[in-house]
Amino acid sequence: DPLGGASVAYWGRIAEHHRLDLTVVNPLTDPTWRFMTLDWDGKIRMDCSSPHAMASLIEKRDRFAIATGNDADADRHGIVTPDGGLMNPNHYLATAIAYLYAHRTEWPADAGVGKTLVSSGMIDRVAGDLGRRLVEVPVGFKWFVGGLLDGSLGFGGEESAGASFLRRDGSVWTTDKDGIILALLASEITAVTGRSPSEHYAALTARFGEPAYARIDAPATREEKARLARLSPAEVTADTLAGEPVTAVLTEAPGNGAPIGGIKVTTENAWFAARPSGTEDVYKIYGESFLGADHLRQVQDEAKLVVLGALGG
């Protein structure tokens, strides 16, 4: 489902050229977007990672071995499986990484795994299991460009359902997000392994644990947002988070040393990152726990206190 966007004219040609059994369920382009189901807030939004915007495709999930969608400019992907419905973007990133590094035998042996610092820790565990170097960068796909160009990264992905990876021979395909190849990869995974991407993710959670992940907003003035963006690790005095010792306080990304415009605090089984919003008087708290949803809520509650303390509140 192209969601009425730029990929609508591509899928038919892709199917023809590669002789794929592929159906474009919604070939419409219409400036009124009358074919779109409304997003969570009642607005029309071509968000292929939203179960509300993707509702019409999710309803058809039992008709196809795999179903995929793209946003309007086709740089993001949404993966729908018969057994799991719409996959969480973090879940699919981890699944794609596990599959690609096991099956792309011509990729450089030292090609690392790129992720943004607010993407799931499941990626860290998958990369460690693969014996691949993890390159954790600030939010923004631009940080993957150099690595994808020179092959030092095989894959780069961000939690908002944007990713790209090398060609089969290990050369660069594109240095921008490509929703089409991530959608095609979901079909490849299903065809080659006989299991859906969501089944593969379930296998990953059986091995590495099942994380709970969420993003929430907290109020902040413009002055507080400016201070948050300039915090140093020394200004964060907390030594525990949700009952676990703090293992790191980051204001620079470990993968490239670039400022993250906020803070990230990690423990053995959880983390949170706080970044100011560029458009609203709030800051964003990303959090994850491998100890369950209740522990994640504790992480989120304590994250607000950590940020407040660091800002001198």
Image (tube, rainbow, N blue to C red):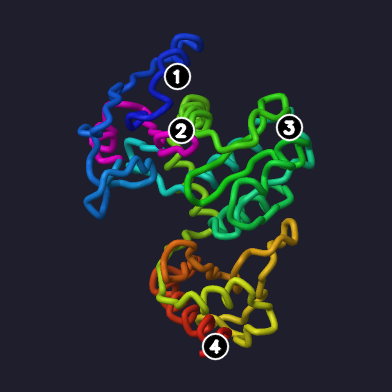
Residue wearing tag 3: 107
Q: Is residue 230 above or below residue 186?
A: below
Q: Are marks 3 and 1 in contact (CB under 8 Å)?
A: no
Q: Can you see residue 270?
A: no
Instruction: Tell me which corner region of the image, top left, top right, bottom left or bottom right, holds residue 47.
Output: top left
Residue plotted at (45% across, 9% down): 16
Q: Quadrant of the N terminus?
A: top left
**SS for callout 3:** loop
Q: Amino acid at mark 3?
A: Trp
Dot in front, 3 or 1: 1
Instruction: Tell me which corner region of the image, top left, top right, bottom left or bottom right, holds residue 68.
Output: top left
**27 horizontally vs 42: left or right:** right
**SS for callout 1:** helix
Q: Are marks 2 and 1 in contact (CB under 8 Å)?
A: yes
Determine the CA span between mark 2 and mark 3.
25 Å
In this rendered view, identify the residue nearer to me: 151 or 146. Answer: 146
Q: Which residues are magenta?
A: 54-78
Residue wearing tag 2: 74
Residue wearing tag 4: 309
Determine the CA span between mark 2 and mark 4.
41 Å
Q: Is residue 193 above or below residue 297?
A: above
Q: Mark 2 or mark 4, which has the lower sequence index? A: 2
Q: Can you see residue 49?
A: yes
Residue wearing tag 1: 10
Q: Mark 3 or mark 4, which has the lower sequence index? A: 3
Residue plotted at (44% across, 14% down): 15
